[in-house]
Amino acid sequence: MPIASTLTESRIRLVCIARVLLFASFMTVAATLPLLIQDWSLSATAAGALVTAFTLGYALSLFLFSWASDYLGAKRVVATSALAAGISSLLFAFLARDWNSAFWLYGLIGLCQGGIYTPLIVLISDEIDPDKRGHAMGMLIASTSVGYASSLALCGLGIALGSWQTAFILTGMLPIFGALLLIWTLAPLTNRIHPSQANLGITDELLRNRRSRLLNTGYIAHNWELLGMWAWIPGFLAAGFALKGLDSAQASMSGAYLSGIMHLFGAVAALSMGRLSDRLGRHKLLFLLAASSTLLSFSIGWLIHLPLILLMLLVLAYAFTCLGDSPILTSALSEAVRPGYLGRVLAWRSLLGFIAGALAPLAFGGVLDLFQQSEPAIAWGMAFAMLGLGGIIASYCAVRLQSNLCDLTPAG
């Protein structure tokens, strides 16, 4: 049980503001993909590989920083990651000018970012009581979405002011300020290290703990759907604008702005669903959200010719359902795993989840290339259907939890 903590709600808000700044470069490539494809003469697969490089680096980063948090303390790990993320974002802003440099430097940003997510989950689990934890996790995850939205908005502004080069610089300069704010905000907290139990190993919590196993499998499938959607929704909206007669720069800028609104809506989903799960229970909401996002994955691409207002409403619903279960999955896992092991469980969950999330944009781009001679609705419909496979698995895990558990109370 968490002890008296200096991590007040006002201090959590400062953490969230810092994360918004740190995530400014997170969506830079996704927002500028149509222009990069044109200026760098890229195939959809090569363009998707840029996002994949970042996500693979992020997956490895999440694993290493999460694992380290059990042994070095979450606070120390968060500070190290934040500073590295700020510096690497500056390097990307001023040095990424072709596919090769962007591939390696964007991957480096991903490699530095992991400590400002999962170790913060460990820190919140240490500091916040379970009956308020869903709300705190919702705030944390909502700040990620606001950061993505800000990144997309800054990219849209950069495209309007110049081109993708300006967008790179605008989004690459903010993370260093976020790093300094985060380090200052967490300074009063204790760097806690929980001792491991002699008769309990990581495999007990990762594989033999049934709740942990189902929640982790659902999270991996959830990431396939969510990260694939995040990477390609700006391009999908840009394609929808282009079909209505806008040129590529206008379509890209409009797609970035509207995708930013989508991420803000996702933040509302994370915050509201996290708080609601504190009141109604975690597993009661998981199936509803997973099944809804699956339905949208299998339908939205086929509807690209809809009037833009209707298409945008569908995208907002898609964002809400895809992200709404994130704080629930995370809060439930923090309650199902014993202290001292959560960092390592999160390490494996994050590594496998973000490998799936890294492959999703690549698979999506491959499907678009495969159907490039087809009618746009067919190409986009088949590509989004690939993401829906993850939704099916996440829904199945939610059903197994709901049908066999009365609650998701803390383990041990």
Image (cartoon, rainbow, N blue to C red):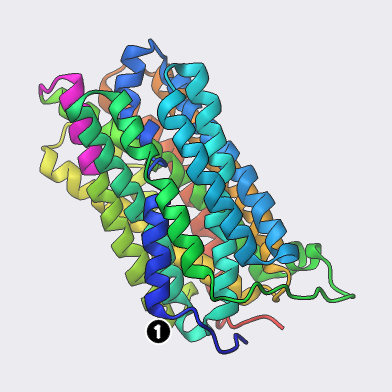
Main SS, magenta region, reads helix
Q: Is residue 257 magenta?
A: yes
Residue 107 colored in magenta in the image: no
| Quadrant of the image occupied by residue 10 | bottom left
Say left or right for 376 vs 408.
Answer: left
Percent of width and height locating residue 186: 51, 69
The one of 377 and 158 positioned closer to us in this rendering: 158
Above-or-below relation of 191 to 373:
below
The part of the image, by quadrant, that contains residue 152 is top left
Taking the image as shown, residue 24 lies to the left or right of residue 122, namely left
Q: Magenta segment range?
A: 245-259
| Image location of residue 156, percent across then percent down | 23, 35
- Crowd class of label 1 (few under 14; some 14 to 19; many from 20; radius 10 Å): few
The local secondary structure at tag 1 comes to: helix
Instruction: Name which residue lies at 50% across and 82% down.
Output: 6
Residue 235 x, y percent position in the rendering: 30, 30
The residue located at (53%, 66%) in the rendering is 330
Whether 279 is drawn above or below 285: the answer is below
Which residue: 51% across, 62% down?
Answer: 183
Location of the C terminus by quadrant is: bottom right
Position of residue 359 relative to residue 291, above or below, is above
Q: Residue furthest top?
A: 41
Does the rendering let one see residue 274?
yes
Viewer-closest of 351 and 397: 351
- On the rendered image, what quadrant is the N terminus found in? bottom right
Residue 8's quadrant in the figure?
Answer: bottom left
| Tag 1 residue | 279
**Vertical comparison of 155 with 137: above or below:** above
Left or right relative to 218: residue 45: left
Residue 96, image x, y percentages: 45, 23
The residue sitting at 20% across, 31% down in the picture is 253
